[in-house]
Image: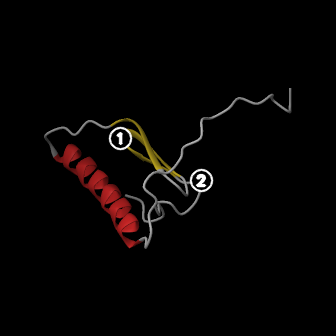
C-alpha cells in the first residue's frame, strides 16, 4: 500500500490494488472493482496490500473519539456541462 494514502484525509487520493480502485474521501473510503488473490506470490503480495489498507482504515476509525452511527451518503446528481 502506498504510504501516501491516508484514509479519510482528503477528497483526492485514489489507490489501486489489482483491479480494485480505492477512493479516499473525508467521510468514507470507497472500494470498487475486483482483486483476484491467486494462490501464488503475486496473490500473496496483493493480499498483503489489501490487508495493509484495511488495517489503516481500522486504525483511523478506532482513533476517532466520536463516530456517528451512520454517515449520510448523498446521491450524486448530474449537472449541466458549463463548458458545452
Residue ID for mark 1:
18
Residue 34 lies, in percent from the top left, at 34, 34
The local secondary structure at tag 2 comes to loop
Q: Nearer the viewer, residue 79 or 36?
A: 79
Quarter assignment of residue 49? bottom left
Quarter assignment of residue 69? bottom left
Does residue 8 lie above or below 20 as drawn?
below
- The residue lying furthest to the front in this view is 69
Quarter assignment of residue 61? bottom left
The local secondary structure at tag 1 comes to loop
Q: Nearer the viewer, residue 12 or 66?
A: 66
Mark 2 or 1: in front is 2
Residue 37 lies, in percent from the top left, at 22, 40
In this picture, residue 62 sits left or right of residue 80: left
In this picture, residue 48 sits left or right of residue 72: left
Identify the mark at residue 82; answer none if there is no mark. none
* Figure colour scheme: secondary structure
Q: Are marks 2 and 1 in contact (CB under 8 Å)?
A: no
Residue occupying image coordinates x 60% and y 54%: 11
Amino acid at each position: 500500500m502506498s504510504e501516501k494514502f491516508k484514509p479519510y484525509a482528503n477528497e483526492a487520493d485514489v489507490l489501486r490494488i489489482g483491479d480494485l480502485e480505492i477512493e479516499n474521501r473525508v467521510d468514507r473510503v470507497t472500494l470498487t472493482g475486483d482483486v483476484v488473490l491467486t494462490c501464488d506470490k503475486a496473490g500473496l503480495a496483493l493480499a498483503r496490500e489489501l490487508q495493509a489498507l484495511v488495517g489503516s482504515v481500522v486504525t483511523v476509525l478506532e482513533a476517532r473519539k466520536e463516530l456517528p452511527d451512520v454517515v449520510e451518503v448523498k446521491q450524486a446528481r448530474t449537472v449541466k456541462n458549463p463548458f458545452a
